[in-house]
Each structure stands twice: as C-alpha cells, then as structure tokens.
Amino acid sequence: LSEIKQFDLLKNEYCKSYPLYFIIPRQIPSYYIHESSQCRSRDRFPIVSYFYIPSNSTGDDKIALLRSSQPLKILTKSKCAYEQEYLSTICGHHGLTIVDCRPKKNAIMYEIIGKGYESTKEYKKLISNVNFHFLGIPNCYKIRKYYISMIKKIFHKKMFAFKKWGEIIMKILHGSSFVANNIVNLSHSVLIH
C-alpha cells in the first residue's frame, strides 16, 4: 500500500458490510465518504475493489473497479455532488461505466419504494465519458430458486435440467466480459452494483 502515493488508507466507520479499512484519493476529505454513504442503500458508498494498471502505463495510471449499492431516490444535490467529485477523482481522465446487475424493470419498480438507479446526467458534469448499462440478472432469491430447480431435475433425471440455470450463468459471464472489456480495452473505470 505504501507504493500507492495518491491514496490514503481510511478506517471504515460508514458501512457495516464493508472491510475495516479502504483506500480513498488523498485529495478527497473523509466527510465526502460519509455524505456519499448517506446517498446509498445500506450506506454502501462506491468503494475501490480493484485497480487495473495497463501494461503501457507509467504506474500512476490506474483504472478502478468500484462497487456500491444502488442510490437512494431521495438524494440531495449537495450529498450527490460529493460523490460525483469523489468518483471523478478516482476516474481521473478515464471514463466511467456504471453497471446495474438488475433487470431494468426491477430498478424502475424499486423507485416506488425510495430506491433508484443511477443517472448519468449528474456525473457528466465532472466526468466526460459516462455510460450506464443494465445486466438483467435476477435477484438472489430467483437465482436460488433456479439452482434448486436444476438440482431437483438432475436428481429426477429430467431433460433440460440446466436451461434456466444456464441462462443465468450466461448473463453473469456476459456481464463479467462486459466489465472486463470496459476496464482493459476501453480504459473506463467501472462502478457496479
């Protein structure tokens, strides 16, 4: 960690489901993280999970993979601005691709209960190239249902036991490929939830 000069190690006092420590850009005050956590479901602000350093890079050029929960619909402009500046600093001169794993219809339905999905409009004020993409992966309960169904069908030697499960696996693999392509080939940082 001492080799990463442009980042500080910060103790996590914001989100119970995150690691005890995480890194943030040195020029970002810690209260930006607090404000950002207030804008996200279960306080899961965008946290850096991985840095990709291109082979032709000087070492200071890092492309980030970040994770967070979906934003709350009740964001205030000031809190949202802190998160935008935080993400802009992490992205640097790279673009940002925001990936929502859910199907679009689920995200729209969640807006009714005060949760939402990302709007690229606000991010484009600070980051020049921002994209948004839904992966269409069902929630964990539906995935578990398909898995159990597959196991039962295998046990009873039924044909097409893998059909629904295979569709889910293909969506996950497609999503993984999409994220990797954005990071490695397009040099976009990726925020996924």
Image (cartoon, helix red, strand yellow):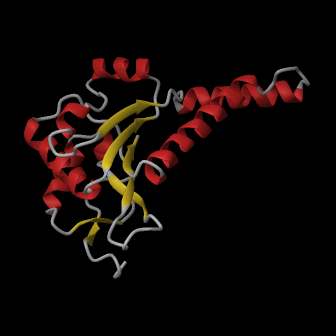
Q: How many marks?
A: 0
User: Residue 91, percent across and down?
Assistant: 28, 54
Residue 156 in sight here = yes
Vertical placement of residue 50 versus 70, above or below: below
Q: Residue furthest left?
A: 78
Q: Quadrant of residue 169?
A: top right
Is residue 131 left or right of 135 when viewed as pictured? Answer: left
Nearest the viewer among 180 and 1 is 180
Is residue 98 left or right of 166 when viewed as pictured? Answer: left
Q: Residue furthest bottom?
A: 2
Q: Quadrant of the C terminus?
A: top left
Residue at 20% from the left image edge and 38% from the top image edge: 124
Vertical placement of residue 170 versus 79, above or below: above
Nearest the viewer among 85 and 130 is 130
Q: Residue furthest right?
A: 157
Residue at 12% from the left image edge and 44% from the top image edge: 81
Residue 66 in sight here = no
Residue at 22% from the left image edge and 51% from the top image edge: 88
User: Residue 2, percent across and down?
Assistant: 34, 82
Is residue 53 left or right of 85 when viewed as pictured? Answer: right
User: Residue 75, percent across and down?
Assistant: 16, 34
Residue at 16% from the left image edge and 45% from the top image edge: 126
Q: Quadrant of residue 96?
A: top left
Vertical placement of residue 106 versus 124, above or below: above
Nearest the viewer among 59 and 10 is 59
User: Residue 159, percent across and down?
Assistant: 87, 20
Q: Quadrant of the N terminus?
A: bottom left
